[in-house]
Image (cartoon, rainbow, N blue to C red):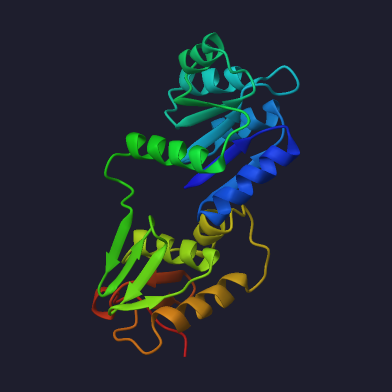
Amino acid sequence: MRCLVIEDDADTSRYVCNGLKEAGHAATPCGNGLDGLHYAVNENWDAIILDRMLPGQVDGLSIVGKLRDLGKRTPVLIISALTSVDERVRGLRAGGDDYISKPFAFSELLARLEALRRRACPGQESMRLQVADLSLDKRTFQVVRASQSINLQPREFRLLEYLMRHEGQVVTRTMLLEAVWDCHFDPQTNVIDVQISRLRNKIDKGFSPALIHTVRGSGYVLAARESAPLAADAP
């Protein structure tokens, strides 16, 4: 998932963002309501984690209310130190999809977030992906090819998941930077090439057919070779 975390407390924001990234998701932090409203309205997110109380004139309820007024149905999980029943009801009636009180366990926040995502996109985000003899299970973070277990680092896992979800499609550097690195500009480094090379060594080396292909001048595609006629692997 690509998540926007609107939270003014730096420690809480860091705690949530780090947890999401360790779980294989992309997380973009935002520390105030004005910027949070801008990002929430003008970009596409799989989910938004929203602090109820934010500094300035734009608070959490204003943000979720504006989203709903614009017809945006992005799942919103409200987090707040306001724990009374009345306050939770206010948050939900304003347009929030769920409400969790501070302090919270990250495991519960993640479970609630994933439940919201499943309800918003039923059947869209399968927890188990399969391409040829390669399988990936998001529940267990297990990757298997030809009955052999493959150990991946979190970033490699996210990269492979993205490629598998776009099986047969050419994915560009920009798409990968935004989805896997949560970066909205090209830092002009070879970070993608390095990660793709490492992933190839684990996924393709010693197996047949090769699944990860380079499309020169465009990006990468994951598919069995006969399913990827446009792929032109680098020598």
- Tell me residue 61's x, y (percent): 58, 18
Q: Is residue 143 visible?
A: yes
Q: Nearer the viewer, residue 129 or 221?
A: 129
Q: Is residue 44 visible?
A: no
Q: Nearer the viewer, residue 201 or 179?
A: 201
- Tell me residue 196's x, y (percent): 51, 75
- Tell me residue 158's x, y (percent): 48, 61
Q: Nearer the viewer, residue 195 or 142?
A: 142
- In the image, residue 91 sits, relative to residue 109, either above or below, namely above
Q: Could you tell me which residue is drawn at 28 percent across and 78 percent down?
A: 147
- Tell me residue 148's x, y (percent): 33, 80
Q: Could you tell me which residue is drawn at 50 percent across and 68 percent down?
A: 156
The answer to which image quadrant residue 105 occupies is top right
- In the image, residue 194 sits, relative to residue 56, either above or below, namely below
Q: Give the side of residue 135 with respect to residue 111, left or right.
A: left
Q: Could you tell me which residue is drawn at 44 percent across and 41 percent down?
A: 111
